[in-house]
Structures are given as structure tokens and as C-alpha cells.
Image: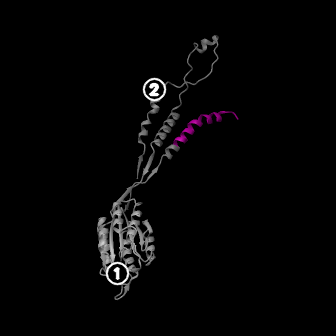
Amino acid sequence: MTLGFDHPWAFALLPLPLLAWLLLPAYREPGFALRLPMLERLTGPAGAAPPEAARPGWARTMLALIAWLLLVVALAAPVRIEPPVTRNTSGRDVLLALDLSGSMSTKDMAGATEGAKVSRLDAARAVLQQFIDRREDDRLSLLVFGSSAFVLAPFTADHKALLGLLGETFPRMAGPQTMIGDAIGLSARTFERAKVSGRLLILLTDGNDTGSRVPPRRAAEIAGNLGVRIYAVSLGDAAAAGEAALDLGALEDIAKATGGAHFHADDPRALAEAYRRIDAMEPTPAQTVSWRPRTPLFVWPLGGFALLMAALLLGPGLREFRRRPA
């Protein structure tokens, strides 16, 4: 803990009373007098200056000087500076876009026990939970899409609440189709309000675009112009045909348009590896914010000045009052 002053220039005012004493004329008490020629020999010649006022005693002078010193110290704005406080902050906003189309209910992902199968959404949620736990210093947002896209959770550092919302998602929650372009477009609008430069969109889907109002490649270009880097993760059988077909080339183009990358996973292990690779490619930047709490202390010298001035101004009056006969 140290003591400092926000306005140290105020100490230049300290010699002001000495300069006033040296440069200004002595104070004379004003008064009225009756002039009589016959008393000229007693009172002195006409027009003589009135006598100087009696100078205050040394005790009052010392009190006045101490009061002035306290006033100058208060003007200098003393502060108590506490030891530094540091906090690690993140420089990234990460938006997780999750496909909730009807095909995400397909149970073709290996489960925890041998031979067991879980849905694609269950496998994706398990991997996303691990990813969220690893990005503890990032602000995260959750966007879900199907026939339409909407932001389920805005950017937040409350990862516990985010995980709660993730656990409540289910297939066809946003409709049965897969509007990838609309999801990227909504992500770009969400990032417009972000305050940091590190902007990541991690898009997870198991299908191809089924008729977005904005083509996925065009939406990716718009997001790239806003400084958003897209990592596309495709899930499912790459050889599937029909409605379940994956357009890996389109996802590759989306990622490359923003300087990102595309990963394909056909089982939970490969999916987890894809998110670990994204972690390695986009580590959370270590930013340390440090500040020293400051407590203003000007009230103490200002209070002392007020007390001394009250004593100087009221002291003579109290003495006169006590001298009066009862």
C-alpha cells in the first residue's frame, strides 16, 4: 500500500501566505473618529493613519498555517493505492452453431458401451460439453438451426447456463431441414455486436444446405468481412446419398472463405478429435488485466481544516462571552 496525490501541483500553493505577508500592506482596522482641534496635540496631526491592528499571537498563527497546509493537502487529492490486482481475460468470442435437423436423431454413433448406439445429437452434445469446459476464459454463444436459425444463448461467460441450454436441445427443435446459409448469416449479425477481434464460428452439421435465403458461400464471405473465422465440422457418413448426403466440398469452401478449416467425423472419437484440433489452432489468448484500487483520502485533511477554521473563528467570540459578567 502506498500514498499518492492525484493533483500534486497543488503543493505549489504552500508559500502563498508567506508571499502575501511579504508583498501585501499591513491590515488596518477601519473605524470612525471625532476630530476636535483642541485635542490635536493629544491625538496627533489631522489625517494621521489609524494604528495598525494588533497582530495575532503565535498560537493562532501556527493554527492558521496548519489549517492552510491541510487545505493544500486536500486540494492535492491524496489517495491510498492498494497492491496490484490482476485478472486473466479472454480475447475471443466463440459462437457454436449446432444443426438440429431431423437427421440429427439418427442413432449411428458409437455409445459408451460396446455395441450401443447413440444419436448424432447426443454425440455432438457430449463433445461440445468437453469443448466448452476447455474454453473457460472465452465468451461463448449457442446458435441452433434447422428450417430456421435462432440464437439460443447470446455471448456469455456463464458456461454453466450455456450447458444447461445445450442439454435442452432436441432434433427438429428448429425444424426438420438444414439451412446452413441462414445460420451463417445470423451468426454474422450476432458478431456485429461483439467487442473483441478474435471471432470464431464453429458450425456442426450432418447435412447439406436445403434452400437458405442466403447461399452459404455468400454468407461466409459476409462473415469473413466482419473478421469471423469459420470452422466447419461435418458429422455422419460421407458416402451417404439423397437427403442424408453431405456436401463436403461446400463446407470446405465455407471454411476457406474465412481462413478457417473443415473437419469430417464419422464417429464420436473423430468428432472429439476435430474439436481438439480447433482448440490447438485457436488457443485462448492469455491477456492479463492489472489495476491498483485507489481510495480517496481528501476528506481527512479537509475535515481537519474545517475544525481548525472553526476554532480560529469562534475562539475569540467564546472568550469574550466567558468574560462577560453574569
Image color mode: one colour
Residue 236 figure quarter: bottom left
Mark drawn on residue 23: 2
Mark 1, mark 2: which one is toward the viewer? 1
**Which amino acid type corresponds to the residue marked 2 in the rendered image?**
Leu
Residue drawn at x 64%, y 13% is: 36
Mark drawn on residue 38: none
Q: Visible in this render: residue 30?
A: yes
Residue 172 figure quarter: bottom left
- Residue 89 position, x and y percent, is 37, 61
Distance of label 1 from label 2 (alpha carbons): 101 Å
Name the N-terminal-most of marks 1 and 2.
2
- As displayed, is residue 242 above or below residue 302? below
Secondary structure state at the residue bearing disc 1: helix
Residue range in magenta is 304-326
Work out whether residue 204 or residue 168 is closer to the camera in this orientation and state it: 204
Work out whether residue 301 or residue 318 is closer to the camera in this orientation and state it: 301
- As displayed, is residue 292 above or below residue 154? above
Residue receiving disc 1: 242
- As displayed, is residue 324 above or below residue 154? above
Work out whether residue 103 or residue 8 is closer to the camera in this orientation and state it: 103
- Residue 152 position, x and y percent, is 45, 70
Q: Is residue 312 magenta?
A: yes
Q: Secondary structure of the magenta portion, mostly?
A: helix
Secondary structure state at the residue bearing disc 2: helix
Residue contact between numbered discs 1 and 2, judged by CB atoms under 8 Å = no
Q: Is residue 306 magenta?
A: yes
Estimate how packed mark 1 is, as few (under 14), some (14 to 19) or many (20 or more) residues with alpha carbons within 10 Å.
Answer: few
**Which amino acid type corresponds to the residue marked 1 in the rendered image?**
Gly
